Image (cartoon, helix red, strand yellow):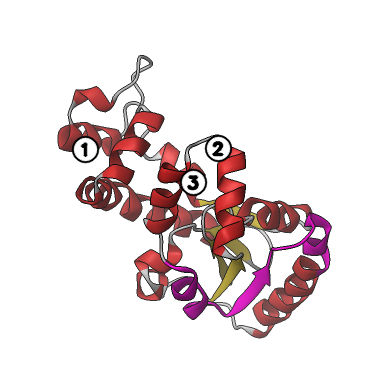
Amino acid sequence: MAHYTIALTGGIASGKSEVERRFRALGVYVADADVAAREVVEPGTPGLAEVVEAFGPDVLGADGGMDRPAMRRRVFADATARLRLEAIIHPRVRAALRTACEAAPGSYAIAAIPLFAEAGRDAYAAWVDRVLVVDVPVELQLERLLRRDGIDETLAWRMIRAQATREQRLSVADDIITNDGPLDALDPAVATLHARYLALAHATPRPL
């Protein structure tokens, strides 16, 4: 069981998934907050029931699940709605990530948490040992988001500005990968960090 946990974070369209993929290829267990966020509001879950209670039945799609595109448009246009949704989902996601990481094989595990800086280190202090930030200039972040999601620039800026600023993310970082170049540049950066994390995990006593 892993006894050392790295939080992997970064702004939207920063390249977190590419970094995550490389750690997985090295055999590191990664618990993904985006996956957990979907699971905690699947049909039949208490999480989805609370979302419906807060926002009404029109948040549901034809399949009985949450209509994610419609909800995304709603919460990025209304800060109060976004905070209400986060208050329902985020505590459940944090609990799921902690359980998964503590049960993971290997010396250390990674929790991929896009909104780590927004919650603050205190929210994860009991089980996250180190924070890795994937950093990218905001202009490149916007360009990638427009290309990836096919959305208009107004919505893209709302999504970026709804998150922590670049400076706020960097302020919580123990380690930084700057992802403003070709993707193959990530390989040596991840390999170097993997060796560092193995050494840190081995030097950290296992809890009794």
Q: Position of residue 35 (x, y in %)?
A: 50, 43
Q: How many C-alpha atoms fall within 10 Å of the one at disc 2: few (<14), some, or many (≥20)?
A: few
Q: Residue at x 30, y 23 (%)?
A: 60
Q: Which residues are magenta?
A: 165-188
How far apart are the alpha carbons under marks 2 and 1? 28 Å
Q: Nearer the viewer, residue 177 or 97?
A: 177
From where the camera sits, is residue 1 visible?
no
Q: Position of residue 22 (x, y in %)?
A: 75, 56
Q: Residue at x 58, y 69 (%)?
A: 133
Q: Is residue 109 above or below residue 207?
A: above
Q: Nearer the viewer, residue 31 or 162?
A: 162
Q: Is residue 30 above or below residue 64?
A: below
Q: Position of residue 176 (x, y in %)?
A: 63, 74
How far apart are the alpha carbons under marks 1 and 3? 19 Å
State which mark lies toward you, 3 or 2: 2
Which amino acid, by three-letter code, is at mark 1? Answer: Glu
Q: Identify the residue under disc 3.
A: 34
Say if mark 1 contacts mark 3, CB within 8 Å.
Answer: no
How far apart are the alpha carbons under marks 3 and 2? 16 Å
Q: Tell me the element at label 1.
A: helix
Q: Identify the residue under disc 2.
A: 149
From where the camera sits, is residue 185 visible?
yes
Instruction: Examine the structure image and report whether residue 46 is included in the region drawn in magenta.
Output: no
Q: How many C-alpha atoms fall within 10 Å of the one at disc 3: few (<14), some, or many (≥20)?
A: few
* First in residue order: circle 2 vs circle 1: 1
* First in residue order: circle 1 vs circle 3: 3
Q: Residue at x 75, y 66 (%)?
A: 190
Instruction: Examine the structure image and report whether residue 186 is included in the region drawn in magenta.
Output: yes
Q: Nearer the viewer, residue 121 or 168?
A: 168
Count of number-bearing discs? 3
Side of 148 where 64 appears, left or right: left
